[in-house]
Amino acid sequence: MATFLYRLGRRAFRRRGLVVLLWVAVLVGAGVASSAAPAPPEDSFSMPGTESQKAFDLLDEQFPAASAEGATARVVIRAPEGAKISDAAGKDRVQDLVADLRAGPQVASVDDPFKADAVSKDGTTAYATVTYKVNAMELTDEARDSLTAATDGAREGGYTVETGGDAVVAEQEMGGTAELIGIGVAAIVLLLTFGSLVAAGMPLLSAIIGVGIGISAIGALGSTLELSATTSTLAMMIGLAVAIDYALFIVSRYRAEIAEGRSPEEAAGRAVGTAGSAVVFAGLTVVVALAGLAIVNIPILTKMGLAAAATVGIAVLIALTLTPALLGFAGKRALSRKDRKAPAGQRAAAKPKLGTRWARFVQRRPVTVLLTAVLGLGVIAVPAASMELGLPDEGSSAPDTTQRKAYDLLSESFGAGFNGPFMIAVDARDAADPEAAADTVSERITGLGKAAAVTPASFNKEGDTAVLTVMPKTGPSDVATESLVHDIRSLSGDIEADTGATMLVTGATAMTIDFSQTLDDALVPYLALVVGLAFLLLMLVFRSVLVPLKAALGFLLSVAAALGAVVAVFQWGWLADLFGVDQPGPIMSMMPIFMIGVVFGLAMDYEVFLVTRMREAYVHGQSAAESVTTGFTHGGRVVAAAAIIMISVFSGFILENDAMIKMMGFGLAIAVLFDAFVVRMAIVPAVLALLGTKAWWLPTWLDRVLPNVDVEGEKLHRELGDTAAPAKPAREPETAGV
């Protein structure tokens, strides 16, 4: 592989104008296609095979006139203090509001609170449910503006009017602030790392073009493949971070080759042949981790993973072709002025030795460093044991939003469980008496004694399918509410045996339970697939069994600590104001498995970048201890810079209003911090120091079976006529360099 990439790098260097032109053409083409495409859809959840989804599908099939997928808005109105909605003035105000709501475009129906029993017992609060003919994605601006105008008009005279439901637009804007912050910090870090504006600009330019192509492609295919705006945001978050890092490593290796006196073209070829090999395998681990999310069988998670994986794939191609082409234009200007003036043999000697000193310190005290790092991450991981999972609802919205205010008004006036009702779908097509079957369902749910109310059954036109609404006594995220869902579902077997009818439970809380269960069931197969494939890839790269094992265990430690930090901030509310968390609450159900996928890929990035340089030194004759020091001497500073860039990119997304993006940005930023600076910079050298030559052990039979991909460039060095290295690395006592 190193030989092929060496030739690719030289070819891109020589034909730099054509390469740059082709990538710019692809960017322009993707941008034009994206601008001409319809707007991306909003996020939607579906979970094939779960009871909640089966119930939704049944209701959609049997109640087509009910607009099962139509957008809804729940308008809550409360009388001024001392007055009541049930007074004459209050009734007039409600009737005017209902009339204004019905006059809006795309409205299918509006329930009158006084006819629908939607007035609180104290007579102060009522709500009207607005159902639209189309889903939230197809709702026009005129329809939303009409809803807003109707509620604004009803507020006169001291009435409180708030609105919830998917017809209400969340007050958030994705204005590009996060991306600008990430790019700005990355530019500063690159400039400090390289000391050259030209060198600092190349990774940024490569990343902007690569991510631009990826995001434009997602935009162009968004309506066709139902890729939401959140999907493109997450793809941008991950793609921007890895794209800068991949180009950074190739530019850094190019500068090192130039410092050794090689011509720019030769240096570009060698940089792509060596660092480029690490980029390929690092990118493969990220792609495997993200694409593996498909086995969870939740469409939104699959689309997020595949879109981000495609963006990472583009970043790899950009790094291998566009970066050496840009180096062709830069030549020796990629070096700082000081390095350009220094003789070739003195350039490398002028590099900072912080990485060298750190590696030697760790090797002198490996046990102390290892225990400190492991115990520290273990303590931070403790909150993860208390993690509560859920899906975001209006109760988790910011306190100043109309959705949250409507949620609170309903809870105060109608009970905590009002915001988390269950829908019970009764399929009585095989029942002898459908009405009797529905009555049996209602009686047995009431008999549990845990529901606040059970509404009478409503049948479809054919009279063979019914729907009931169950109002729990507790809130949507309460443990007692979840217990009620399980209790109701446990009745289904006896009900079917006694009546012949099938009972299915759905609704927001039931959906959350099914969502969490689906993710729990998929976690072990997902980990087995991702860790297994990545383990094989790392064995190919490092020709070792223990190094990939160490990498996987280190990842588990860093992701556990990251999840602990997420729970502490977003669930417990620690430092919530600092990170802009308006309402602490359950962690989103998809967060753990998505973080596992993304963090595993990114963790393997640093493992590959740092340890391949150690492996390269080892196969060229250095001792195990010397190779660790060499790896940190050449790679430590660059890995640290890459990690800071990735942390800054992810941290920028903490400023977004979207709760999911904010949580993802924080989780990924803290995970990279732990993995790069604790696991890879401390635990890795400590473990390698303790293992010595055993770290690079590979059974003879496995050595024969595994193909030699030559990531360290041993074959390339022989082909180029470099000084021959020993055929087998020396196995002297582990004292050198310590």
Image (cartoon, rainbow, N blue to C red):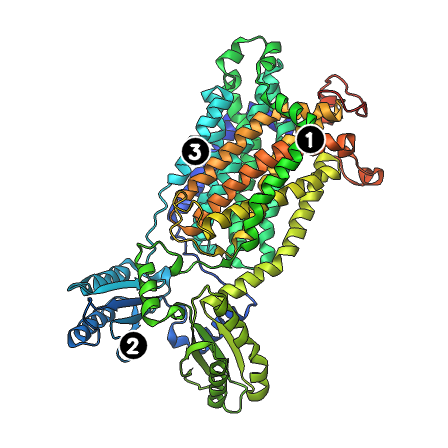
The residue under label 2 is which amino acid type? Answer: Lys
- C-alpha distance separating marks 1 and 2: 69 Å
Relative side of 405 to 449, left or right:
left
- C-alpha distance separating marks 1 and 3: 36 Å
Question: Which badge, 1 or 3, is on the more N-terminal residue?
Answer: 3
The local secondary structure at tag 2 comes to loop
Relative side of 359 to 383, left or right:
right
* Residue 366 numbered mark, or none: 1
The local secondary structure at tag 3 comes to helix
Point 42% across, 71% down: residue: 421
Where's the C terminus, which quadrant? top right
The residue under label 3 is 183
The residue under label 3 is which amino acid type? Answer: Ile
- Camera sees residue 332: yes
The residue under label 2 is 121
- Image coordinates for residue 360, horizontal then vertical, percent: 66, 23
570 up-or-down from 7: above or below: below
- Image coordinates for residue 467, horizontal then vertical, percent: 44, 79
Point out the frontmost of discs 1 and 3.
Answer: 1
Q: Quadrant of residue 486?
A: bottom right
- How crowded pointer 1 is (Cα within 10 Å; few <14, some 14-19, many 20+) is rated as many
- Camera sees residue 282: no
The residue under label 1 is which amino acid type? Answer: Pro
Relative side of 59 to 82, left or right:
right
Is there a contact, CB below 8 Å, between mark 3 and mark 2?
no
